[in-house]
Amino acid sequence: MSTLDDLPVSEYAFPGPLRDLLVGAIRAGEKTTTTFLLRELEIDDEPMTVVGDRAAVIDSAGIPVGIETVEEVRVVRLADVDLAHVLGEGEGYASVAEWRAGHESFWHGREYRESVGDPEFRVDDDTLAVLVRFSFQTG
């Protein structure tokens, strides 16, 4: 069995209040889905997430808090994200429109744009997103 130290790291957002909120929701069992943009894999030259992948979820201090196991992966246009996925994000969004607005705020923010090396980056309906459903167990 893998220990937390043997696993790749799973980081939610950037260190700070948003990561703390998301990791808290994961630990509470409220967050069971997540979204990232396909272009992030391309920029970082990383392989596609696949069912069965395991990773150590870390908090803002970089401390592992448990293990996530990928249960489902879908690649969809942002316009095609469904309500079930949105509700699984555990962030309190009641509609896809609310979720989209919140995520666009993140993706259009300075930190994200710097991380992808594009100060003018914007998403649109055709931007490809990776939707992941996962389970979590404390380490």
Image (cartoon, grey):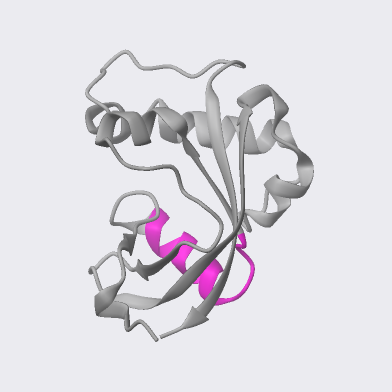
Residue 91 location in percent, x, y?
Answer: 60, 54
Image quarter of the C terminus: bottom left
Residue appearing at x 24%, y 78% in the figure = 5
Task: Give coordinates of residue 56: x percent, y percent.
Answer: 36, 70
> On the rendered image, what quadrant is the N terminus found in?
bottom left
Question: Residue 38 at what x, y percent from top left?
Answer: 45, 31
Q: How many marks?
A: 0
Picture coordinates of residue 118, whole percent (x, y): 26, 18
Establish if 107 lies above or below 58. above
Q: Main secondary structure of the magenta part?
A: helix
Picture quadrant of residue 19 = bottom left
Relative depth, front residue between 75 and 33: 75
**Residue 31 picture quarter:** bottom right
Choose between 51 and 4: the one closer to the eye: 51
Q: Which residues are magenta?
A: 18-32
Q: Residue at x 72, y 35 (%)?
A: 96
Q: Is residue 45 left or right of residue 100?
A: left
Query: Relative to 12, does residue 124 appear above or below in the rendering?
Result: above
Residue at the (36%, 36%) spot, across then down:
41
Question: Relative to 103, is 86 on the left or the right?
Answer: right
Residue 60 or 45: which is nearer the viewer?
45
